[in-house]
Image (cartoon, rainbow, N blue to C red):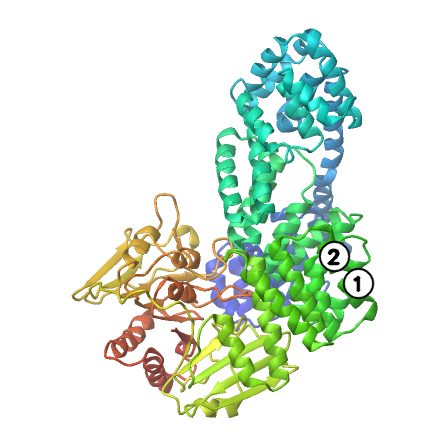
Amino acid sequence: MEAAGDVHGLAAAYLVRGNAQMAVPYLQKAGDSPDVASDKAVMALDRKDYATALTLLERALQAQPKHAQALWNRGLVLRELDLWLLAAQSFEAVAELGEHGWAAEARARAKALRGRMDGLKEWRAAVAAGEALVAGTGTMSAEQLQARPGVFRMFLYEAMRVAPSVERLKALWPVAETLDARFGGSTLRDTLRWTEARDFRRRGPLAARYLELYRTHKVEGGLEAYLEEVRRAGERDLFLGALVREEKVSKHLGAFTEVASQVRDPWFLLLAEYEKGLQAISRGALLEAEQIYLGAVARCREQQLDYRCAPIHAVLGDLYRQLHRLPESNSQVLAARAAYRNDGRWGETRFLLLLGQNARYQGESALARALLEEALVRAPEDCGVRHFVRANDALALLGELSVAAARQRMSEALSCEGPLSLAGAKTMADLSRLSPNPEQDQRLLVGLESRRRTGSLSPGEMALATFIEGHFYMERDRARGEALLQRAIVEAKRLPSYNVDARKALSYSYRSLLVAAGRAGEYERALALFGEELGGTLPKRCLMAVSADDGRLLILAIGPDGRTKGHFEANHSKPLGTDARGVVPDELVEALRACPQVDVVARPPLHGQAELLPPDVAWAYYVLRPPPTRVPTVARSRLVVADVEAPSALGLPPLGVWEQSPGEGTRVLSGSKATPSRVLEAMADATEIEVHAHGLVNPNVSEASLLVLSPESSGRYALTAGEVQARALRGQPLVILAACRAAKGAPWMHERFSLPVAFIDAGARTVLAATVDVPDAEAGPFFNEVRGRIQRGQHAASALRDVRMEWLARDPQSWVRAVLVFD
C-alpha cells in the first residue's frame, strides 16, 4: 500500500487493527473525500470527541447523502450521546441501502434503539402503581421500588398523608422499609412512626380533606384556610404536602423552610433550597443562587436523592448557561440527565434543549443540531419545543449567512402559537434587513411587547429585548433605533457585570451603532463608539479598529499623521472565523506601515485572529483595562513552567526537555510540581511568565483554549482562562505561552474571552501566544529571541515582527506567522 501511495488504505488498515495513533499521519495526507471524513470521524469517536465526529460525518453526508459508512458511523456517535431516535434513523438509512449483512444488523440496532423509548409505557405503569398505593388498592414489588425509588417515595408520602387510620399506615411499612434500605437511614420509617402516633380523631378529617385536595386540587374552605388549620394542628406533613401539591412552596417559602427544618427530611430540605434559589434568580441575584445550589448539590452527593436532585442540577445548569460558564453548565445538565434516569423518570427533552443551546454557544454546530433535533423528534407535538429548536436553527444558519434557510426555519418556529423566544426575536430582527417579510416583521414587535407585558423577562433579558427592537428599527428609522440602542446600553450598565444577557445587550448595541456610523461614513463617530465601549481613551495615532456584523465590515485606521481613514463593506463575502488574511484593504495597510507599531482594537469574531495585518507590520491586539493602582514593587522574577507530566489519558506526545540554564531570579516549576494550583500561586508576583506545555481546546473544560499541566491529586490538570482571569498578577508580567493554539478564544460574538485576554485582565502587561500548533523543537529558540529583544527595551510588537521576518526568510509558511501580541 505504501509503495502504491495508498495512504487512505494504510489509515483504514491501522483503524481496523485498533491503532488510531498510527492512522493519524496517513489520514492527514489522504485528502478531503467523504471516505476520509468518515474515517477521521472514527478516530474522533475513539477519543470520545463526539462534536468533531459529527462535524466530519455531516460534511461527508452533505457530499454523499447515501454514504453507508458515514451513516453507520453517525449512528454509532449518536448512540454514544444517547440520542436514540436520531441514531435509529441513521441505522435505518443504512438498512435501506440493502447491503448484504449490514442491512440486517442495522435494522436490529435501530429496533433496539427505538425500544429505549418504551420507557414511556413503563413510566405510565409506575404512575398507575403509585396512584394505587395512595388509594389503598395496591402496592408494588421490591423490584419496582428499586427501579424507581424516588417516584415511589413521592407516592409513599402521599399515601401517608391521606391514610384515614393507623391500620392503613401499617400496610405501608414494607414499602417504607424497602425504600429506606435503598436510600440508607430510617427517614421513611421514622415518618411512619410519627404519623401513627398522631391523634386520628383530629387528624382523620384533615387527612380526608387532603385526599380531596390530592384528587381535585380543591379543598373545603380554600387552600389558605386549610394550610392555617393543619399547621395549627401540628400536622406538618399535611402542610408540606399541600404546598407541594398546589405548587405554592415559593409563596410560603419561609413557613415551608421552617417546617422542613423541623421534619429534618432531606427530601423537603432540598425542595426548600430549590425554591430559594429560584427566588434569588428571579431577583437577578445569580451568584447568590449559585451558592444556594452548590450547597444543595453537596447535600445531593450525601443523600443520593436523584428524583429530588435532578431539578437542582438542571436549574444550576441553566444558571451557568445564563452566566456563560458553559463547561460547568454541561456538567450539571449531564448530572441532571443521569439522575433523571437513575430514578426511572420520563422525559429528557429540556436537558437536550439546554445541551443543544450550549453546543451552539461553543461553536459546535453539528452537535447542537443533533441535540436539538433529537428533542424535537422525541416531542414532535410540543409547540414550545418546536419553536425553541427551529428558532435556534435559524439563528445558527444566519450566523453562516444562509439567509433563505434561516427564514424557512423561522417560519417553522412561528407556526407554533406561544411566546416569542429572544433567540427567535434576534433572528427575526436580522432577517428583517436581509430578507424582509412584513407579516413576520410585525410579529416580532408584537412578540416583544407581549413578553414585556407578561413580565416573563429577567432584567438582563429586558435589556436584550430593547436592543432587538432598536436593531430592528435601525434599518427603518435610524433616530428611533439609536434611541432604543442607547436605552439598552443604559439598562445593561445598571446590571451587575456577571449578567451575561446585559453584557450581550451592551455589545450588540454598540455593534449596531458602529455599523450605522460606518455605513454613513461617520468615522470619527465610530472611533468614539469604539472607545466608549471599551471604557477609555484610545490612542490618537497608529491605531486600527475593526468590527464585523452579519457580513458587514467596518475598519478604521489612524496613521502616524493622526488622520483617520475608513472602510465599510455592506456585504463582505469572505467568511470570518478562520484567519483574517486579506480582510484589511491594502490602502489602510499602507496608511499604517510608517507606524513603529500599531494598536489593534478588534471586536469578536476578529479579535484574536492571526494575520489581520501583514507579517512585516508590527502590531498588537489592544486590550484596555483599568490602570494599575500602583507601580509594582516586586523584584524581577521569572517563572518558567516546563517538563510538564500531562495525564496519560489525554494521549499527548511528550514535549522536549527544557534544557536552558534557569539564570538568576528564575523559578522553574516542572514535573509533578507543575500543577495548576502551584502555577497559579507562583504567577502572582512574577514579572515574567513562560509556559512550555501542551495547549488544548476542550469545550468540556473551558470555552477557550487551556494549558495542560501536571495533574493534582484530584486529577485536575487544566489551567483555564477563567482561573487566570480571577487572579491578580501583581508583577504585571510579560507572559509567553509557548503552547499549541494558546491564543484560540471562545467562539462568542458578545465579548473577547481567551487565555491572553485573561492574563491581561489579571494584570499582565504583554502576552505572546499562537493560534496554531507550535513545534516543540522551535518554540524555545523563537520565543527566547523575542523575549531577549523585549528585555533590551524593544516594544513587544516590533520585537515579534523583527524575529518573525527573520524566520519567514528561511520558511515563508512557518507557524510564526500565527504568533500574536496582546498588549
Rendering coords of residue 795 (x, y %): 31, 80
Q: Is residue 155 visible?
A: no
Looking at the rendered image, the quarter that the C terminus falls into is bottom left
Asked whether, in this view, residue 754 is left or right of residue 410, the answer is: left
Q: Can you tell which quarter of the image residue 731 is in?
A: bottom left
| Residue nearer the viewer, 770 or 463 | 463
Q: Earlier in the sequence, mark 2 or mark 1?
A: 2
Residue that appears at 30% across and 77% down: 786
Q: Can you tell which quarter of the image residue 38 is in?
A: bottom right
> Amino acid type of disc 2?
Leu
| Residue nearer the viewer, 760 or 331 | 760
Instruction: Determine the CA span between mark 2 and mark 1.
Output: 9 Å
Task: Quickly name the residue at label 1.
Answer: 443
Q: Residues within 10 Å of mark 2 (few under 14, many from 20)?
A: many
Q: Is there CB contact under 8 Å for labels 2 and 1?
A: yes
Task: Quickly name the residue at label 2.
Answer: 420
Rendering coords of residue 502 (x, y %): 57, 60
Rendering coords of residue 488 (x, y %): 61, 65
| Residue nearer the viewer, 647 or 639 | 639
Residue that appears at 43% across and 81% down: 813
| Residue nearer the viewer, 758 or 9 | 758
**Total labels drawn:** 2
Asked whether, in this view, residue 668 is left or right of residue 652, the answer is: left
Mark on residue 109? none
Rendering coords of residue 148 (x, y %): 64, 28
In this picture, is 396 found above or below 782?
above
Q: Is residue 734 visible?
A: yes
Q: Residues within 10 Å of mark 1 (few under 14, many from 20)?
A: some
For numbered disc 2, what is the local secondary structure? loop
> Amino acid type of disc 1?
Arg
Residue that appears at 73% across and 74% down: 433
For numbered disc 1, what is the local secondary structure? helix
